[in-house]
Image (spheres, helix red, strand yellow):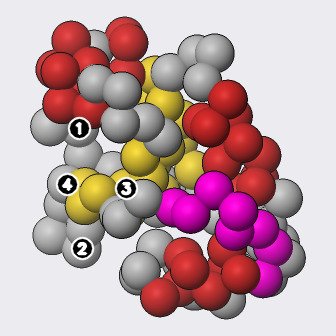
Amino acid sequence: MIEPSPTELLRLYSRQGCCLCEGLQERLEALVPQPPIALVDIDRDPELQHRYGLRVPVLARAREGGGWQDLPPVPPRLTGERLARWLESNGAVTGAEP
């Protein structure tokens, strides 16, 4: 298990060429302030590839005691303020705005 760094709050499990993954990444990067996100290509790790398969994108948040907690699937139409509120309600960030 890869432990989060102090500056890494979110992890986006994705794969290259995945339009849903790229779309979620763009929507997250458009938030102000932009939450610290690490991109993880699951195809580079057989364990992650087995765990997530075609279920990407998956957003995970750092746990206080270490490790990662997968969040529920992010609705693909959430953007801006609605995405920020979704992140807050799932304990992923605080105070993000569109």
Label 1 crowd (10 A; few <14 / some 14-19 / many >=20): few
Residue 83 counted in the magenta span: no
Residue 44 position, x and y percent, is 37, 10
Residue 2 has which mark? 1
Q: Residue at x 18, y 31 (%)?
A: 51
Residue 63 position, x and y percent, is 25, 68
Residue 60 has which mark? 3
Q: Residue at x 25, y 61 (%)?
A: 69
Question: The residue under label 4 is which amino acid type?
Answer: Gly
Residue 40 position, x and y percent, is 45, 30
Task: Nearest to the eye among marks 3 and 2: give it.
Answer: 3
Q: Which residues are magenta?
A: 74-81
Structural distance between the alpha carbons of marks 3 and 2: 13 Å
- Counting residues from the start of the chain, the first of labels 3 and 1 encountered is 1
**Residue 2, quarter of the rendered image:** top left
- Counting residues from the start of the chain, the first of labels 1 and 2 encountered is 1
Task: Nearest to the eye among marks 3 and 4: give it.
Answer: 3
Look at the picture and state if 10 lies above or below 47: below
Question: The residue under label 3 is which amino acid type?
Answer: Ala
Residue 87 position, x and y percent, is 54, 76
- Residue 13, can we see it? no
Secondary structure of residue under mark 3: strand
- The residue that label 2 is drawn on is 64
Look at the picture and state if 26 lies above or below 87: above
Taking depth in this image into account, of 38 and 82 the one nearest to the observer is: 82
Instruction: Report the number of numbered marks.
Output: 4
Secondary structure of residue under mark 4: loop
Report the magenta stretch's main SS.
loop
Q: Residue at x 66, y 48 (%)?
A: 24
